[in-house]
Structures are given as C-alpha cells and as structure tokens.
Image (tube, helix red, strand yellow):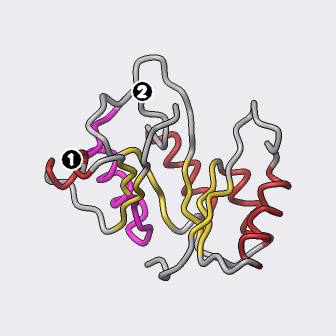
Amino acid sequence: MLPQGLIVSCQALADEPLYSSFIMSKMALAAYQGGAVGIRANSKDDIIAIKKEVDLPIIGIVKRDYPDSKVFITATRTEVDELLDSGCDVIALDATAQPRPNESLADLVKYIRNKAPHIEIMADISTIEESPTRRCIRFRLYWYNITWLH
C-alpha cells in the first residue's frame, strides 16, 4: 500500500521539452528531496531510471495512442507487461467505461491479478460516476483526474 502523503507525477511525452528518462529520474529525485512519498511515472524506461535514483513506491503507467479507442493510459496487456518488467509497485490504468482497444477492463484487471498478485492496481477516473465499482470491478486505489487532457 502507498504511504499517505504527496505523490508527484514525473512524466514527459516525446513531444515535450523534458522528455528523457534521465531528466525524469532527476525530477523524481527533486520530488523525493522535497518530501514526496511516491512517484507516478510513464514508461518502462523512465521507471527503471527513477528506481535507480530514489527508493520510493512508483505508480507506473504507459501512455499509448490506439486508433480505435480514447483509452491511452495502460490500455492493453502489452503496456501491463512493460510495467511488470519495469519493477513498479503499482500499475495504474484507465478505469473509465470508455471502449478499450482490446480486452475489457475486467479482463485486464484479472490478467494483472493472475500474473502479478503482489502488484497493486490503481483506477484512473475523472468522476465518481466513472467508478469501476459500478461495474463490479474492485480497486483499492484511485487516481482522480480533474480533466483528461488527451
């Protein structure tokens, strides 16, 4: 379980000026020095670099576009497998009811729980109404996005 306190998101996409695993690892170090108790990071490479820099729990995501879906945060088993290889402590995924590119949210959660029962799973939602518990999928952790910028 994640400790109580500030979790800092250290992410940059390929078209952004700070895009670099090295830079993200230094952002995570600055967050740690400032009192963060956890880091949220995008991509296997960034997570591996951050783990070398700080000893904090890491919430891992992979942002990837799919032409047939608006879901782009840890949307498929491919992204889940990348995160499992990264050594992150928590896997976060879009838990909204939006159509997914491959398997259902329930199938993806089942895949994670079967493959890595020790990994926590975090539901990314933007409203309480999107809560996956309404679809009988239980999560212990939620990440609330005020607005989806994608």
Q: Residue at x 79, y 42 (%)?
A: 19
Q: Quadrant of the N terminus?
A: bottom left
Residue type highlighted by circle 1: Glu
The answer for how far apart the CA atoms under marks 2 and 1 are is 18 Å
- Which one is in front in this view, the residue at disc 2 or the one at disc 1? 1
Crowding at dot 2, Cα within 10 Å, few <14 / some 14-19 / many 20+, comes out as some
Residue 60, placed above or below residue 95:
below
Circle 1 — which element? Answer: helix
Residue 47, horizontal then vertical, whole percent: 68, 58
Residue type highlighted by circle 2: Lys
Residue 124, placed above or below residue 70:
below
**Front-lying residue, 46 or 149:** 149
Per the rendered image, the range of residues in magenta is: 103-122
Residue 81, horizontal then vertical, whole percent: 52, 49
**Residue 126 highlighted magenta (yes or no):** no
Q: Which mark is residue 48?
A: none
Q: Are marks 2 and 1 in contact (CB under 8 Å)?
A: no
Q: Which mark is residue 129?
A: 1
Residue 136, placed above or below residue 100:
below
Q: Residue at x 56, y 57 (%)?
A: 60
Q: Which residue position holds label 2? A: 70
